[in-house]
Amino acid sequence: MTFKRAAGIALATLILWPQALVAAETPLIAVLQEEKPDSVDAAIRAEIRVAFREQNGDWIPVCRETSQPDSRAACAFAGETPAHWQVVLHGRDVGVVQTRDWLERDAYAGIGLLRVFGDEIPHAGPRTTEFAGWAGVPVHRPLIAFNVRRNWNVRWRNSYPADTPTASLLSSMRKLVPTVPACTQNGDRRGPGRPLVAADIHVTELWKAPRGERLIGASLKTERVKPCEYDFDLVADSWFYDDGKSPVRALPALASNDTTHRLVDIGDFAGNGHEEALFWLSGYDEDGFILLFDGFRKSARFAWTYH
């Protein structure tokens, strides 16, 4: 479905049931995401995953960690009740989807998943591997979905990252990757390596706001560790916040030696004048989401494994 067509369907649906997304409910952040189930022959499908809820000004995961992959027991949400979700991309309505029950997948990767009904499932852009996760199958990008109507001014824009100066990131990046390893032709470590310098840093993703703020994703350049068989985890991305006034600040929740992150969306998700940023995370046998809030100083994490 094209974006234009999806937006038309969304508008028509909202006219038919405006109360469904306006009711005074606890603000929830869900995600419309595609995935390929474990079955080899199963087709890629779209589902709603209930991720975070607001609680006393903070955000917490809707589902708790559990030894049993049972959404009914692990998630603080009445998934059995039919619900409508406003699907949004960068502040614009993309469509509306309906759920009626938990998906009931007998796997940890099914935690928080709601069954989507209807043939017209909104999406944006082509399928790519940018948000493929552990399965590695091309999918449409995840889209934020709300249980209440949300409108916000779109301040942040995705920008071209290649020419971004890296000197301002060096101090924070050295705390995460202090040295560049040296390796033999066999891939083994050789000596202590050398200190990280600005030329070793590669900016992978860049988002800008009109007042000069920046969200910067960066990693060690791949060629710096190419000979090192066991050091490819050093190229996993880290993220930084630059308000344009103070020194660049690292975002610890988005720094892991074996996990990569991509920004899904950013905006005033709760409608309270404060911005949140939702990131996709993907690591070894793990995918999930991280939500940054309170000036990007606090975070909530919701992730799942596959085995």
Image: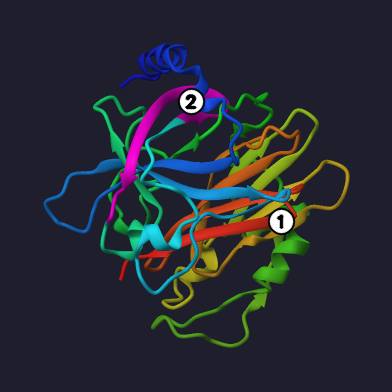
- Please say if 86 is above or below 18: below
- Residue 4 lies, with reference to residue 300, above or below; the image says above
Residue drawn at point x = 79 percent, y = 52 percent: 248
Number of residues whose C-alpha sits closer than 10 Å to that of mark 1, classed few (under 14), some (14–19) or many (20 or more): some
Amino acid bearing label 2: Ala
Counting from the top left corner in percent of width and height, residue 9 is at 37, 15
- Where residue 124 sits, quadrant-wise, is top left
Relative side of 105 to 173, left or right: left
For residue 39, the mark is none
Magenta-highlighted residues: 86-104
Residue tagged by mark 1?
A: 298
User: Residue 88 magenta-drawn?
Assistant: yes
Q: Which residue is mark 2?
A: 20
Q: Quadrant of the C terminus?
A: bottom left
Q: Residue drawn at (87%, 49%), measured in percent from left and top?
A: 246
Q: Is residue 204 in sight in this rendering?
A: no
* Label 1: which secondary element: strand
> Residue 303 location in percent, x, y?
47, 61
Residue 125, percent from left and from top: 38, 29
Query: Magenta region, mostly helix, strand or loop?
Result: strand
- Looking at this view, is 231 or 280 the one in front? 280
- In which quadrant is the N terminus drawn? top left
